[in-house]
Image (cartoon, rainbow, N blue to C red):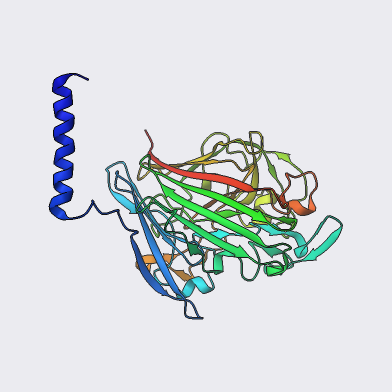
Amino acid sequence: MRPRHALIWISAALYMLTCISCTGHKPETPTMDKHPFGTTPDGRQVYVYTLKNSRGMEARIMSFGGVLLSLTAPDKNAKFADVVLAYDSLPPYFVNKPYFGALIGRYGNRIGKGKFSLDGKSYTLATNNGANHLHGGLKGFDKVLWDVNETESVPGRSVVLSYVSKDGEEGYPGTLTVKVTYALTDSNELRIDYRATTDSPTIVNLTHHSYFNLAGQGNGDILAHELMIDADRFTPIDAGLIPTGELRPVEGTPMDFRTPVAIGARINSSEEQLKLAGGYDHNWVLNRAEKAYGLAARVHEPGSGRAMEVYTSEPGLQFYSGNFLDGSDTGKGERVYRHRYGFCLETQHFPDSPNKPAFPSTVLRPGEEYRSSTTYRFLIHP
């Protein structure tokens, strides 16, 4: 070390020691930015945790349901807007029929007739979507109070949620221990990492259910958003929205989003699949090996210039065009959420996989760890 550099280093060290001695303590560790958000019907406190990055983005996560309450992103003029649909207060989340912003489990999407077999034993789940099981049942992970590990969380940057789903909950076998980490990076990415273990064989398919509108929540429908999905095939559905088991090519159909297309361009076509779902509510088979992390979809909103990319380790992506939004939900800032005011891009294993042996398996066994990662990255379209 050169003498001049050594003197600079020593001076800096002495300055730090002087600061500590003057104040009487070391610099304080940042604390979690959390605020009360009401109580559950049984009197437990619900908190909201705020994450911020160095570029001005902000995400707010609620401990009830693991809900993403808000997410701001800049437009082409550097103006920030909240781009996810949500409620302003806690009570609507006790019902939350649209699943706004929630963590979904044990099984995201549908299981036909609420039944499946595992290792020769039959299981019956709650049927909460006609004759079928949807998003974990009557009281899925979207309607439970998650524990927050403030020691593992990084103040202002990440929040770690955990939940133990007991054996038999909603009809599922095995006690499942789940940990989900939300992190907001300086690359304008919201990353969600899922981990789970079980003490008995079970099925798991965790996902996140935010409704996005890149023009800003409540600012009209999403039909002009341009969508790309990196998938050559999708899983067609029957009248109950359950996959038939076929992996059908998208080529030549309104399901082809391999190059960017406006969501509304073909949504009202006479295609049977769109009529069955009332729009898009299908699973796309992503173009890569299972568990390989990569780009799944990209969305661009022409008016604001905002764009969002979705990266995931999951083999499937459910694109839902907000078909069941009907104006009966009033969200943040008294905005009424009308038909197709938001879209969902739910990374997942395929719907009804436990009853479709050819689909990627969702079975988790003792000694294994369920691992899944998804990132929503925000940028300005050139």
Which residue is at the front of the view, 224 or 20?
20
Choose between 380 and 370: the one closer to the eye: 370
The image quarter in which residue 170 lies: bottom right
- With respect to residue 209, does 94 lie above or below? below
- Count of numbered circles in the view: 0
Q: Seen from this angle, which residue lies furthest top? A: 2
The foreground one among 78 and 142 is: 142
- In percent of width and height, residue 11 lies at 13, 34
The residue drawn where x is 70% and y is 66% is: 167
Does residue 127 appear in the picture of this structure?
no
Can residue 275 be seen here?
yes
In the rendered image, the residue lying farthest to the right is 120
Q: Position of residue 301 (x, y in %)?
A: 41, 44
Image-based side of 56 in relation to 327, left or right: left
* Location of residue 325 in the rendering, given as x and y in whole percent from the top left corner: 52, 63
Residue pictured at 38% horizontal, 66% vertical: 332
Give left or right: position of 367 versus 226.
Answer: right
